[in-house]
Amino acid sequence: MTEAPPIDAIADETAYAEAVQLAADAAAAYYGDGTSSLDDDAYDRLVRGIAAYEKAHPDHVLEASPTGKVAGVVGDVPHTVPMLSLDNVFGPEELAGWTASLERRLGRPVTAWSVEPKLDGLAIAARYRDGRLVQLVTRGDGSAGEDVSHAIGTIVGLPGRLADPVTVELRGEVMMTARQFEEACAKRQAHDGTTFANPRSAAAGTLRAQDRPYVCELTFFGYGALPLPDDTSDLATRLREWPHSRVMDWVAGQGVQTTAGTAVAGIVATSVEQVQQRVEEIAAARPELPFGIDGIVIKADDAADQAQAGFGSRAPRWAIAYKLPAVQKITKLLGVEWNTGRTGVIAPRAVLEPVELDGSVVTYATLHNPSDIKRRGLMLGDSVVVYKAGDVIPRVESPVVHLRTGDEQPIVFPEVCPTCGGEIDASQERWRCVRGRTCRAIASIRYAVGRDQLDVEGLADNRIQQMLDAGLIADFGDLFFLTREQLLGLERMGEVSTGNLLTAIDRARTRPLSRVFCALGVRGTGRSMSRRIARHFGSMEAIRAADAEEFQKVDGIGPEKAPVIVAELAELSDLVDKLVRAGVNMVEPGVAAVAGDEGGTTTAAPGGDEPGALPLTGMTVVVTGAMSGQLAALSRNQMNELVEQAGGRASSSVSAKTSLVVAGENAGSKRAKAESLGVRIVSPEEFAEMVAQLLPGRR
Ligand SMILES: NC(=O)c1ccc[n+]([C@@H]2O[C@H](COP(=O)([O-])OP(=O)(O)OC[C@H]3O[C@@H](n4cnc5c(N)ncnc54)[C@H](O)[C@@H]3O)[C@@H](O)[C@H]2O)c1
Ligand SMILES: [Zn+2]
């Protein structure tokens, strides 16, 4: 699932000292008010680099090094039992290696593992005396933490009184849920115009803040309970002897929140396979959770196993954190684009400095709406925290205010509709073009009937407008249901032009799937992408049945684009239904539809040849200049369609990867470039011969 992570290599002693200083500063900020200049991924790379250097140069190790100890802000409240960190594994093999080594250490198999989410907040000790919450202490450096009792009463899930009048220390994570984070950001925004970078740092800052004029709510999830060291009561004995899972049941029974009620509740697994399975379930549930997790914690459940394994200086030996890939990174907000959606909503989209996140490169992220931008206090040029997990559409969480340089610029909000230039209705959170659906309708109908899509001849812009105004159409699907009488009823519409238009519309019903799909105007799918999609799936039915994962099998569609396409197609489902009812062609000629989950398309050439027998298989072809001979009548788009039907890939620019250039009259610079690169050049006539088997069917 995850791989062993990369490190920042350190060259010499000076670089090592600098790295240690940087890590110390970042950790101080991280555990202090939560405002580190590094994201977790960058910090972890740095620490791994430090560890690697120390291994090679044990005599250089500095006192301030973050390795081998619990990092945190030292406090003056000693812990009865050290509050440690956790060691990490990064995948199934490392996990299996760790469980095996623990069993070797114990000299017996571990028969029960508890598997819980690793909550992404800060550790806290909550001390109860006779059932009353009396003190809250942070982890600090593990042996002493800070008193943050002032936060008592603001933490959901951590009651002031337990069900029983017991004296006990609960340990768990303090964090903010997504809702609490939004509220905290809004409060801070109203107060000083800034926001928090992410829920974890918001929780850290909030827990330690004493003199804020506003109060932010926090959430607690318990993951442990310990009696005082000298407590010999029945309960103390039981807490020491019970398996971890039983302790957690007791904690929940005292009215304290645990993960038990969530989608990622802790379980007890009896084999490493079961552990791994639960790890994967928790990882899969992560994007939908209302709170952040950054891994899975696996613990030997049995108290005797724990006691025998004991503790290292930094972490217990009976527990491990299975880390999940980072879903948050810091990058730059380069720009904001505004687009009017199908329903007239004007939506902003962030343009980012590309950043790798959860396995894909993110360049765009949603910004929801204008008031959201204001609420988050975003500026152009800001360092921003970007969130993306799985198929979730990436989103900008917040600016990292303390990284501002002063060069940031305000984000410019549009004054008119970016699509039609019309007025904007800004009375609600989501801005709309006053034309609503018709704003996009004109633009999208114009696009759909264009020469490279449905190619409805003689349907000029003013006609589209006229039909929209008359209420005859609302989208291009309605064109196929127009009657002679309706058209004749329009101004300046005579018998002849009506007949011509109806014929042209009728012809549009027979376009290949690639053009019908292109006509839908799904964002990010232009002509060549539409052809690839049509060739991959073969039918509209298969396209509509596909999920984001299936779309990623199409060349050029990555994990960022795929979910957007799926979401837009769902939005377009009424329109597609209408096209089906209208008898519009929904298959790609010469392509068999993708069958179920088997994936893979069968590209049958006319005549039933094997897929590999297509004349241009594996070739990248650029067409340039004027076509002649048999190809004279073909537009550039039709030429590209031909290239792809012949198994090739159409491209518009010549590079070393180009296999063939079809150069007609006046070919110019592309021909010259092909010559200089030694790319094979053919005339339109020679090309016609190469693809002769595909030509008779065309006109
Ligand atoms: N961005 C930065 O500048 C910066 C600086 C320092 C540390 N960090 C991040 O913090 C991490 C290291 O921090 P750490 O030493 O606090 O350790 P950790 O967060 O990796 O793991 C230990 C902690 O996990 C928590 N935890 C969550 N769920 C738990 C459960 N079910 N059972 C037990 N414990 C649970 C506890 O708070 C415990 O202290 C690094 O991986 C790094 O990403 C970032
Ligand atoms: Zn508009």
Image: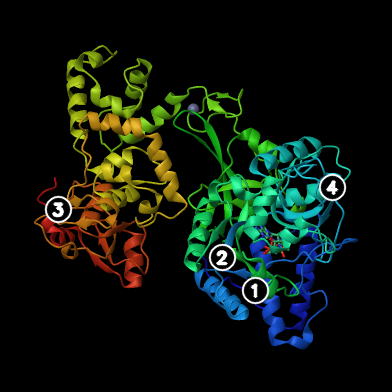
Q: Nearer the viewer, residue 357 or 304?
A: 304
Pointer 4: residues within 10 angstroms few (<14), some, or many (20+)?
few
**Residue 87 visible to the viewer:** no
Task: Tell me the tag on residue 629.
Answer: 3
Badge 3, how many Cα within 10 Å: few under 14, some, many 20+? few
- Tag 3 and tag 4, C-beta contact below 8 Å: no
Residue 347 rendering spot, x and y as whole percentages? 54, 35
Mark 1, residue position: 8
Q: For the residues marked 1 and 3, what is the alpha-carbon distance in whole angstroms?
A: 60 Å
Please state which amino acid type lies under the numbered disc 3. Answer: Gly
| Label 1 beta carbon within 8 A of ligand 1 | no
Question: Which of pointers 3 and 2 indicates the residue nearer the eye?
Answer: 2
Return the residue at label 4.
Answer: 130
Q: Measure the alpha-carbon separation of dots 3 and 2.
A: 77 Å
The mark found on residue 112 in the picture is: 2
Number of numbered discs: 4
Secondary element at tag 2: loop
Q: Is mark 3 on a helix, strand or loop?
A: helix
Q: Residue at x 78, y 75 (%)?
A: 65
39 lies above or below 364: below
- In this orientation, does residue 18 appear? yes
Query: Where on the picture, by quarter, is residue 98?
Result: bottom right
Question: Which callout, 2 or 1, points at the residue further toward the start of the chain?
Answer: 1
